[in-house]
């Protein structure tokens, strides 16, 4: 099981995947917004989204779990 975590603190601007989606390494899964900048968060390996731990508008800290892949 792979975990995708936040690279910095910010608000979840957009969740780009749904549970059950297949993702490829490098594919953006979440976009964070911090200091008026959009920060894409990409999958580090291929997998299937099994759980999304955030919703649009949530605030996350650095290293918070965003998405789990299988």
Image (cartoon, helix red, strand yellow):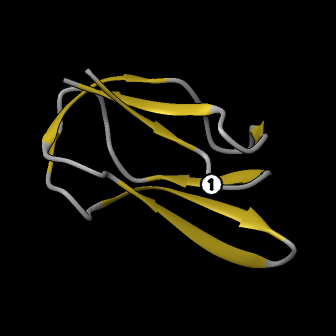
Circle 1 SS class: loop
Q: Quadrant of residue 39?
A: bottom right
Of residues 32 and 63, the one drawn nearer to the viewer in this rendering: 63
Q: Position of residue 25 (x, y in %)?
A: 19, 57
**As drawn, is 47 to the left or to the right of 39?**
left
**As drawn, is 52 to the left or to the right of 60?**
left
Q: Quadrant of residue 42?
A: bottom left
**As drawn, is 50 to the left or to the right of 30?**
left
- Residue at position x 18%, y 23% in the image: 70
Q: Does residue 35 sit above or below 59 in this rendering?
A: below
Q: Position of residue 19 (x, y in %)?
A: 28, 27
Q: Residues within 10 Å of mark 1 (few under 14, many from 20)?
A: some
**As drawn, is 39 to the left or to the right of 45?**
right
Q: Quadrant of residue 8?
A: bottom right
Q: Position of residue 66 (x, y in %)?
A: 53, 35
- Residue at position x 87%, y 74% in the image: 35
Total tally of numbered discs in the picture: 1
Q: Quadrant of the N terminus?
A: top left
- Residue at position x 43%, y 32% in the image: 67
Of residues 2 and 19, the one drawn nearer to the viewer in this rendering: 2
Q: Does residue 35 sit above or below 24 in this rendering?
A: below
Name the residue at the bottom extreme.
37
- Residue at position x 31%, y 36% in the image: 18
Name the residue at the right extreme.
35
Q: Position of residue 63 (x, y in %)?
A: 65, 38
Residue wearing tag 1: 7
């Amino acid at each position: 099981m792979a975990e995708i975590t936040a690279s910095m603190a910010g608000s979840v601007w957009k969740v780009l995947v749904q549970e059950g989606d297949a993702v490829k390494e490098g594919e953006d899964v979440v976009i964070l917004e911090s200091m008026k900048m959009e920060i894409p968060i990409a999958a580090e390996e291929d997998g299937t989204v099994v759980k999304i731990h955030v919703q649009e508008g949530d605030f996350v800290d650095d290293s918070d779990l965003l998405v789990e892949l299988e």
